[in-house]
Amino acid sequence: MELPFFYLFAAGIVGASLLMVTRANVIHAALSLVLVFLFMAGLFVLAGAEFLAGVQILIYAGGIMVLYLFSIMLMNVGVAVRLRQWHRQSALAFLAAALLALEVWVVLWKVSLPAGKAWPWQLGQTPGNVEALGMVLYTKFLFPFEVASVLLLAAMIGAIVLAKRQITR
Amino acid sequence: MGIAIEAAVALVKIAVVLGAVSLVVAYLTYLERKIIARIQVRMGPMRVGWHGLLQPIADGIKLLLKEDIIPAKADRVVFVLAPIMVLVPAFVVYSVLPFSPSFYITQVNVGLFFIIAVSSLGVFGIVMAGWASNSKYSLVGALRSAAQMLSYEIFLGFSIIGPLMLAGSLNMQKIVEAQSEVWFVFYQPLAFVVFFIAALAETNRVPFDLPEAETELVAGFHTEYSGMKFAFFFLAEYANIMVVSTVAVTLFFGGWQGIGWIPLPGFVWYVLKLGAMIFVFIWIRATLPRYRYDQLMRLGWKFMFPLVMANIFLTGLVKFLFL
Amino acid sequence: MVPLTHYLALGAILFLIGAAGVLMRRNAIMILLSIELMLNSVNVTLVGFARQWADLTGQVFAIFIIAVAACEAAVGLAILIAINRDRSLVNVDEINLLKW
């Protein structure tokens, strides 16, 4: 029962991401990326990462992409749409990417692993995903957690300082 | 076979909830006009149907028949998608809310988180509407509204951490069941006040409705919209009011829990509490003046943010020491 | 049950679509968006592995990747806004003041 849903979400993700890299209008590309994130949240729920799915929608789609949209609106994209969109060496880049894709798929074809067991919360048992994640995050990964918060603070201050309008008198 | 039956039952439930919510949202416009009129010592809609009861239907038909104008230089795809992006998240939230002990569409372990996450997608519709209209008033109104909604969404999220700590679960059904003795509003009055103010700002209601006030920016982000698309924005605002009222009732006022000895079914209690909450929203609209934009931001970041952090800290302290 | 190779294959495709986007587009914002896509492909791979070995470390790592992606998006966009303010440029070929 899971496999059809996986194919549905995977098709949505790949389709929306192809849409994203081919759009000339940057706003359309950003909105396609939001679509990618929504499908990806569905995929995460399928894989038993419910908290991560919520975080993906709340932060990635609802925060980072709004930041992108605001920034795109602050820049003059009307001019950028009329310029040449594709790099001069696009064909070479596409060839390199396609070859790499082929290599990865050949490797995966030869690997055979048994499918994993379902998580306990996917079977309706009590320790939910959020509780289990909290247990692990605040005991084993406490130090990276605190470092991540300091990193966010540093990024916030850095972004404000970089984008501030210099007031010259 | 079992899956097919479950899917059919779920579809029927979804149809019932969607139909009921759409009807209530449409009549909420009528209710608002009537209540504001009575507060202002006048009668409100009286002509269409008995005491104006058919007014929402007349409004709906009028908006459907209006000419659908899309500005020449507007981004057509985004212009058409924006009203949908505002309306759909409001309806999606109803899938995890419990209306009575046995009637809910689904029960998700991260129900509360899902609600906050999906409501945050409403900002996209507003930003897209403002941008795609290709007009200054729309863009400024949309950016103001988006900044306001993003800031107050943070306070909304933090204010629900208090009841979450008391209930011990993100599952909406378990949160309602945890309030069987005392409703959380008595344990967390500060969180409720912050939640209410943040809900007013999230839904762009007075006193935080600067982005769409007629005297400020023509009509803010929906300046260039006409006909059914404008109706969608309008309906989306009322649907959002219903959603935050429902979440407030579920989190703070016990959902479908009754008051001890009075024998009414859970669903009736739920409707009564929801009605009272929506009445307070409309009452505030008729009473309070509007905040200026910088006052609004200052109120949020300098007053409500420390308050909500203090609430989380105090709740954690009390829970650790005494419970 | 979804086998692990499906998650890995999906992650690989997404990574390569993102890499193609970074290499082929000239607009700086498109490059940043493609980088976000590559970060998400890594998330998909991590969640697949977490499910395979029933170890929550994969999901925790994915949360940290989302946090780092937020930081990187903010700083990258701030740099672009600073460049764009003076000279109204978004094509990376033309941002070449440091070229000697």
Image (cartoon, helix red, strand yellow):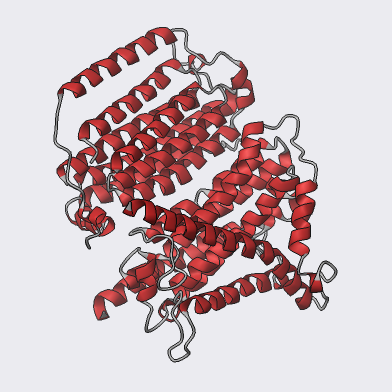
How many circles with numbers are drawn on the protein?
0
Indicate the position of residue B80 as horizontal and vertical percent values: 65, 38
Indicate the position of residue B75 as horizontal and vertical percent values: 66, 31
Q: Which of A148 and C98 is in front in this view?
A: A148
Indicate the position of residue B221 as horizontal and vertical percent values: 68, 46
Q: In this view, does B117 lie above or below B29?
A: above
Asked whether the viewer can see residue B151, the reply is no
Q: Which residue lies furthest to the bottom in this view?
A: B261
Q: Which of B27 and B15 is in front in this view?
A: B15
Left or right, B272 with respect to C45, comes to right
Q: In this view, does B50 lie above or below B126?
A: below
Indicate the position of residue B273 as horizontal and vertical percent values: 54, 77
The residue drawn where x is 43% and y is 58% is: B9
Asked whether the viewer can see residue C40, the reply is yes
Q: In which quarter of the image is the C terminus of chain B?
A: bottom left
The residue drawn where x is 23% and y is 41% is: C1
Q: Is residue B73 above or below residue B32?
A: above
Q: Residue furthest front?
A: B1
The residue drawn where x is 21% and y is 18% is: A106
Q: Which of C60 and B62 is in front in this view?
A: B62
Left or right, B312 with respect to A116, comes to right
Left or right, B213 with respect to B6, comes to right
Quarter of the figure with residue B109:
bottom left
Q: Nearer the viewer, residue B216 or C88?
A: B216
The residue drawn where x is 41% and y is 21% is: C22
Quarter of the figure with residue A42:
top left
Q: In this view, does C75 lie above or below B115?
A: above
